Image (cartoon, rainbow, N blue to C red):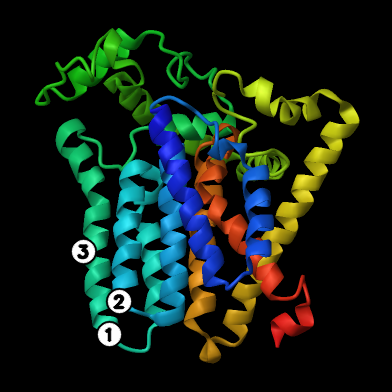
Amino acid sequence: MHLFNIFCSFVITIYFFLICKEFNFSKKIIYILFFIFIGISPSLLMYENFIHYTNLSVLLFMIISFNFIKFGKTSNFQYEIKIYFYLILLMYTWSAFSHPAVVLGIFLIIFFSKQNNKINSLLLFILVLAISLLPSIKNKILFNYFSNTTWPGLQLVQVLERYDYKYPLCSYDLVDIPIHENAYINDNPAKNFNHQSLVGEKSRYNTIALIYRSKECLPFAIGLIKKDPMNFIKIVKFNLISSHGHFSFDFGMKPNNWENIFGFFDDLKSNYFTNKFKVRGIQLYHLIFHLFFISIAIKLIINFKKRNSYDLSIIAIYFLYCWIIFISHVGAGFEFERMRHTGHAIHLLFVSLVIKNNFFNFKKFIE
């Protein structure tokens, strides 16, 4: 898996170069961008070296971004096919992307980008939408649970931090697992759950006990949100602002010898002043970053009749990134902020667009 992650990082770097070439940057600018790109993301060199989807999902996001840029320039149907193909791979790599809303959002942006062949786009959308629903259909057939993920109840409880409710029912702790496995088996007598990947000690977090917990805790979590929606909004707002003051690699399992090579990133947190500077600096960067892409979206809305495929393709990539932010903070909690790393390509696009627009010359930008 370590070698596979290194291979993914190598291919990511190739696509980094290809995206830079699409902006017609000189070698000097490409070198500068490369050191920025790697400098703020040592995760590309050393990340979670176990069976995990992070580096693979970064690679797929990078390929999708590249094909969107090509599509924005040419509106060629082959790039549309490639976008959906790699989006499907991303869906099956990370269930958060298999939600129909993702496919619909991408389709609408592509549909309004094109001047012709819109019927082909519609047919392709219907096919990809059907493919995106396959995990939910599979879960319904196998587990009597129609959803692309089996943990939404537990994840909402994680956002609300109410693990105490009927503990360990609404926690991820592997306690009372046989009890909850048997409860789910009794609720679904027609299903066969005898395989060791679903029940028993070897199943671990794949156990059907967590499906039972999620189904039982989902009404509780929704009830808490309905009872005090402002509290839920405050929690999400705090997690959103707080997480944007961290590097994407501040959470999660770090590989061996991380401290020997990238320990200075962790050392920033050990001092009050350097930590405050780090947090506020990263938050300011993200504020400018989001405002930049929002300004592009506003410009497109105001001048909708004069819209161009290139700007819409940039917004499509930003839409995918925002989906990561939304699903991580609203549906999973602060612990999943490391998933921002998936959309690392959008930061490359941001810096590239800033350079192409003469370093925040907004007068030129809005003309």
Of 243 and 70, nearer the camera is 70
Q: Earlier in the sequence, mark 1 or mark 2?
A: 2
Report helix, strand or loop for mark 2.
Answer: helix
Label 2 near label 3: C-beta < 8 Å? no
- Give the amino acid at mark 2: Phe
Residue 79 x, y percent position in the rendering: 34, 70
The residue under label 2 is: 77
* Distance (Cα) linking label 3 and label 1: 16 Å
- Give the amino acid at mark 3: Leu
Q: Is residue 313 left or right of residue 211?
A: right
Q: Quadrant of residue 199?
A: top left
Label 2 near label 1: C-beta < 8 Å? yes
- Give the amino acid at mark 1: Asn
Q: Is residue 226 visible?
A: no
Report helix, strand or loop for mark 1.
Answer: loop
Q: Residue at x 78, y 77 (%)?
A: 361
Above or below 279: residue 13? below
Residue 169 x, y percent position in the rendering: 42, 18
The residue under label 1 is: 117
Q: Earlier in the sequence, mark 3 or mark 1?
A: 1
